Amino acid sequence: MHRFLYALFIAKPCALHVGIEDSGPYQAQPNAILEKVFLSITKYPDEKRLEGLSKQLDWDVRKIQCWFRHRRNQDKPPTLTKFCESIGLYYYYIMELAFYWSLMFSQFTDIKRKDFLLMFVHHLATIGLITFSYVNNMVRVGTLVMCLHDASDFLLEAAKLANYAKYQRLCDTLFVIFSAVFVVTRLGIYPFWILNTTLFESWEMIGPYPSWWLFNGLLLILQVLHVIWSYLIARIAFKALIRGKVSKDDRSDVESSSEDEDVTACTKSPCGNNSSNGANRLNGHMGGNYWAEQ
């Protein structure tokens, strides 16, 4: 946003004042042959095709490359669209960051569970990754990781609602579906797609750098937590399939004296930092960066 405002209200007026004219974006000159190749065959011609077009049109190869580059630029979305997209990402990050800051503080007022330390580590890593990925312009991997982790959250919340409404069979079904989605996204897509890109592909392309170690270290911390929570969820889901009912939350505080707190796993999920009113949702976001690695 600040770059857009700077270019519009400062850079452009200064350039016009010193005599630099605003000629607008360069438009690729119409050419039927190149246009046909661009629309029907490829927008990124290789060297062999460039040489063939050069002989056919009697153009220099570099001139043809420039034509394709400018033609691709014409298909890019307008600046206003990019500006709106950046605003959308900004609010997405702000909401996620605010949510996890609230969990950070509410964790000390909620009922303490066996995984209190794990939850605290998770919140620290998540807040760090969300902030880091946005500040370092790693919003692509950041949004990918956040969306990936959001994929299973609504299923857990739906299971909680079914439990509150006393629809036990629906609660059990939703929880089993949630468990499957959780395991697929956290133990499948996340490590083999996201971590593989941020760890190995980025190493081969640009090599490690100081922030690379921090970013991937936090992503790996999340993966360790994913493994632990997946084990707890799978154990409860397995018991639900065998017994026909979701069992007690393995994380529940054994020192609690209230029988109302000994509820099903749908009310107190092993996957989230849930308060007594069920307001909190499943934990496990990147953040990003997201790296979006993220």
Image (tube, rainbow, N blue to C red):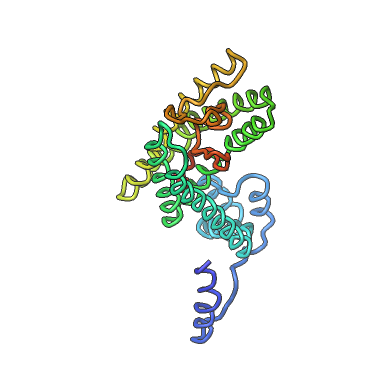
Q: Quadrant of the C terminus?
A: top left
Q: Quadrant of residue 120?
A: top left
Residue at image point 41% right, 55% down: 136
Residue 200 visible in the picture = no
Spot occupied by residue 255 in the image (x, y as percentages of width and height): 42, 29
Judging depth in this view, the residue of 6 and 246 nearest the camera is 246
Q: Is any part of residue 104 visible from this angle?
A: yes
**Residue drawn 61% across and 46% down?**
42
Q: Is residue 186 left or right of residue 30?
A: left
Residue 209, given in percent of the width and then of the height, sits at 31, 49
Relative vertical location of residue 27 with respect to residue 241 in this rendering, above or below: below
Vertical position of residue 137 compared to residue 232: above or below: below
Q: Position of residue 51 (x, y in %)?
A: 53, 49
Please say if 151 is above or below 215. above
Q: Residue at x 59, y 16 (%)?
A: 241
Task: Classify residue 108 as left or right of residue 67.
Answer: left
**Residue 211 x/y as whole percent:** 33, 50
Q: Residue at x 59, y 33 (%)?
A: 156
What is the tally of numbered marks visible in this picture? Answer: 0
